[in-house]
Amino acid sequence: MAMRREVLERQLSVATTLRDERVKHLSGQGKSEAEYRKDAKWRQANSTCRSLTRRLRRVAEKREQVQESDSDD
């Protein structure tokens, strides 16, 4: 599992693009936002975005912890 911020940001960008493309496809079919949850491809793309966002937050927390521990020394 990559924990480099740059890698995670790039992966999130790609995943967000895929999710947005799926949203465009679904809205073109006349689906409402509530109906997106029924679409397996949208659920997968949304799950990936949420996971990557969570991992980016964790990287930021780790970075803060390291900076705090360095400043304590």
Image (cartoon, grey):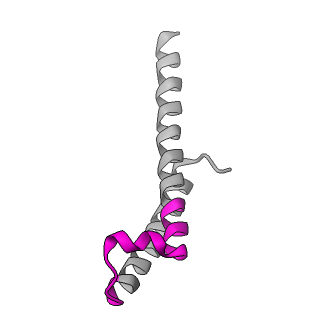
- Secondary structure mostly seen in the magenta stretch: helix
15 over 53 or under it: above or below:
below
**Residue at 53% over, 9% down:** 73
- Is residue 39 in the magenta section? yes
- Residue at far bottom of view: 29
> From which residue to which does the magenta span run?
27-48
Q: Position of residue 70 (x, y in %)?
A: 52, 18
**Residue at 52% over, 39% down:** 59
31 lies left or right of 69: left
64 over 6 or under it: above or below:
above
3 lies left or right of 38: right
Q: Nearer the viewer, residue 64 or 47?
A: 47
Quadrant of the image occupied by residue 22: bottom left
Q: How many marks?
A: 0
**Residue at 40% over, 86% down:** 25
60 over 67 or under it: above or below:
below
- Residue at far right of view: 1
Q: Position of residue 50 (x, y in %)?
A: 48, 55
- Is residue 38 in the magenta section? yes
Q: Position of residue 55 (x, y in %)?
A: 54, 46
**Residue at 46% over, 15% down:** 71
Q: Position of residue 23 (x, y in %)?
A: 38, 77
Q: Nearer the viewer, residue 72 or 33?
A: 33
